[in-house]
Amino acid sequence: MNQLSIRHLTGIRGLTRNDLDLIFQTAKGFKEVINRPIKKVPSLRDITIANLFFENSTRTRLSFELAEKRLSADVVNFSAGSSSVKKGETLVDTVNNILAMKVDLVVIRHPHPGAPDFLARKLDTVVVNAGDGTHEHPTQALLDAFSLLERLGDLEGKNVAIVGDIRHSRVAISNILCLKLMGANVRVCGPKTLIPKHIQTLGVEVSHDLDETLLWCDVANMLRIQLERQERGSVPYFPSLREYAMQYGLNNERMNRIDRPITIMHPGPINRGVEITSDVADSAHSIILDQVENGVAIRMAVLYLLTAKG
Amino acid sequence: MDSQVLIDKELFERLVDRMAHQLLEHHDFSETDLVGLQPRGYLLALRIQKRLKQLEPHLEIQCGALDTTFHRDDFRQRETHIAPSLTLMPFLVENRNVILIDDVLFTGRTIRSGLDALMAHGRPKSVQLMVLIDRRFQRELPIEAKYIGKSVDSLDRQYVFVDWEDQPGLSQVLLLNEKPK
């Protein structure tokens, strides 16, 4: 039980319940570490990690970089904007060139689904997926589940609603897989245009009514409306942000209508006033900032356990 | 499996008693804290703390638990790595005298990582080491204990097993001829 069953973390798919428990247990240790006066341990001092971000990211990238530095790893950063990718270099060539500089582990975010899987098959190094297109974002799902465990104690039989843009969300897919593995009941909720067909095959319920879903759930994970994807399509997914906020935005009025406390999550960045209003996001029900803190601990645990296999 | 009792249940209590008295000889506990290394050093530290309280009820004695997993130097060299235990350090050791407590002193590597982990909680004025068992011929690092329950001459392949029981009077220490599975 003391070892992960995987060599790469490309997605939640492929993980076992044992893996999850081991990651959460290790993350608990690291959470204590990052609350010490000296927040650093020497575990990965002989490891070099490359953060390859082929897509923009602030939070995930900062979180990974902090996790790496608190484990004493050496870190190199790469972002697509300022690199030879623009000159037409292929993904494998780019990464192989970086690996030739003796890098032990690669953290990759890429706009194309499957890019981390592809690298894991092609390269002789450990690969960690930091988000690939609309496919998966495993560390986000792990930190979400870890934050929920802290708040609720156990996820077995708990009702979790994932609300908003499911179609474009890698967070949604990883979350569904992770929560199901933990024994929770999962429901997705959003406008028809933003819920992919056949999502039921993942074992989730589908709803288009937020008020009814709020009555059902113990936890509401409010996803971000991805404005950049909304504007790009020739036909928008919903008529206007105002209409979306009225139908699917979480506000105090809606919260007051339910008779028991529910836990509110958001993976960030928040569009305040669209999917969630400020008073709800900043309320005592919200664990949004716990999620951010736990993100560093979870990523430390993942990097630590993956490099432990040598 | 062959085993030999190193410390029987009666002697175990005597040793705890003696070590508690030794501490009182050198410390008035106005600036001294106990810190046990997880998992079994912490159990010993709690036992010592309890005994000290019986001997000197007016003393305020703090006892912390330190996990050394992330500071170990054999990470990635072991076949399976150690799952971390909790660190419970509700106080800073800045400018305090620390009694670092573990059950068995063997190669000295755990104590080294413990010292490393301890420094993350402040700069202590001094650190003294207390162990129940000192396997004195197997040291790999220049580390010696100040308070020792019992010194043992053992072979490298042998294993010292501290059989902990929560209630006083039931714990004992065994010397096994091979490492338990």
Image (cartoon, rainbow, N blue to C red):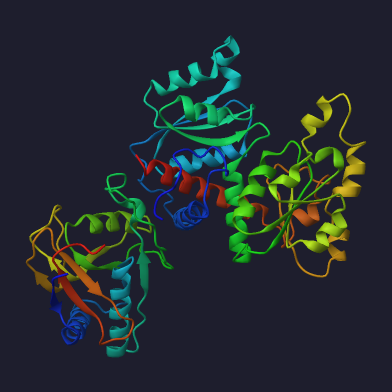
Q: Is residue A56 visible?
A: yes
Q: Position of residue A267 (x, y in %)?
A: 68, 46
Q: Nearer the viewer, residue A263 or A173?
A: A173
Q: Which residue is drawn at 78% across and 39% down?
A: A196
Q: Residue at x 37, y 75 (%)?
A: B62
Q: Which residue is drawn at 17% across and 61% down?
A: B106
Q: Is residue B8 left or right of residue A208?
A: left
- Number of labels in the image equals 0
Q: Position of residue A71 (x, y in %)?
A: 41, 44
Quarter of the picture containing the C terminus of chain A is top left
Residue B147 lies in quadrant:
bottom left
Residue A184 in the image: above or below residue B43: above
Q: Nearer the viewer, residue A161 or A66?
A: A161
Residue A257 lies in quadrant:
bottom right
Q: Where is residue A246 in the image (x, y as percent from the top left)?
A: 91, 48
Q: Is residue B172 left or right of residue A165?
A: left
Quarter of the picture containing the N terminus of chain A is bottom left
Residue B81 in the image: above or below residue A94: below
Residue A153 lies in quadrant:
bottom right
Residue A121 in the image: above or below residue B110: above
Q: Is residue A70 left or right of residue A148?
A: left
Q: In this view, does B124 lie to the left or right of A54?
A: left
Residue B16 in the image: above or below residue A197: below
Q: Residue at x 40, y 50 (%)?
A: A3
Q: Is residue A77 visible?
A: no
Q: Position of residue B160 (x, y in %)?
A: 18, 68
